[in-house]
Amino acid sequence: MTTIAPSPKRTKRGRPQWLVPAGLIVLSLVPVIAGAFRLTTLVSGVSTPDTEKYYDSLVPVVAHIVSATLFCVLGAFQFVPRLRRGRPSWHRMSGRIVLPAGLIAALSGIWMALFFAGPEGDGGLLLAFRLVVGPAMFVFLLLGLRAILRRDIKTHSAWMIRGYALGIGAGTQVLTLLVYSLIAGEPDPVTSSLLFGLAWVINLAVAEYVIRRPRTSGRSGANRAAVR
């Protein structure tokens, strides 16, 4: 009897393996484009009310934009099983870019939170959120690094997913703000800060689901099956 193996480009259930990274890149699209626009404006020397405050501290701002873009976009491809398992050298090489980029993004984000004023009238709520999220992301990525140095792949994957979930928070924040604005109008500073915090909570909840969801036994064996 002939058994046909599943296509290597699809999972056991027929879902394209590129669906998740494509969705993550789309989620990052608005903040990545906004960051690219701000970076172009800063490099060109054009002063606007939005960018004027950044000229005295260009290095951390540029570092944050570039590292966050690399972390979000290149990091999305780490979720492609075919690249992780079929091309482990690519996964390791890209990981050596993604992880430092994430650490730089976290540190520069903390710096920006401390030295650039948040929205007036939020009582420092957004600053408090950022001073929790930034260090948490940094620690998660360091724990992921420690795990892979110990060759603990499962733990490495879990901590990297948590770190990525926090790093991609800006994309989810666009959605939470958009949904609220469509339903209730423009949010006030406190509500806006709460929506930012909600986005990080949503991302972490999804990350924990992905980490803890039951795995179908024999999946990898099925994917390696050949025509008999």
Image (cartoon, rainbow, N blue to C red):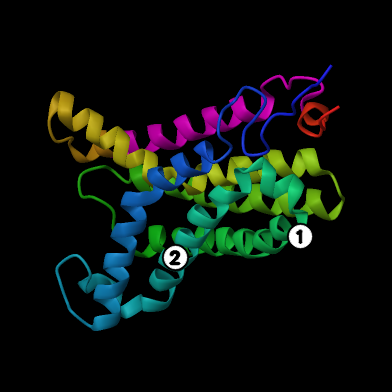
Q: How far apart are marks 1 and 2 (CA)?
A: 27 Å
In magenta segment, residue 2: no
Q: In this view, does 25 lie to the left or right of 102?
A: left
* Residue located at (44% from left, 65% from top): 64
**Amino acid under label 1?**
Ser
Query: Residue 21 in the image: x percent, y percent?
Result: 52, 43
Give yes or no for contact between labels 1 and 2 (Cβ–Cβ under 8 Å): no
Q: In this view, does 65 lie to the left or right of 102?
A: left
Does the image show residue 128?
Answer: no
Q: In the image, residue 39 lies at what x, y percent?
A: 32, 71
Q: Name the residue under label 2.
A: 64
Q: In this orientation, does residue 148 appear? A: yes
Disc 1 secondary structure class? helix
Q: Does the magenta stretch include residue 211?
A: yes
| Badge nearest the viewer, 1 or 2 | 1
Look at the image and tell me in which quarter the C terminus lies. Answer: top right
Q: Mark 1 points at which residue?
A: 89
* Residue 2 percent across, percent down from the top left: 81, 21
Which residue is located at x 50 percent, y 49 percent? 167
* Three-letter residue code for mark 2: His
Q: Give whichever of discs 1 and 2 has the lower sequence position.
A: 2
Residue 16, quarter of the rendered image: top right
Q: Give the range drawn in magenta.
A: 193-219
Q: In which quarter of the image is residue 138?
A: bottom right
Disc 2 packing (10 Å; few <14; some 14–19; many ≥20): many
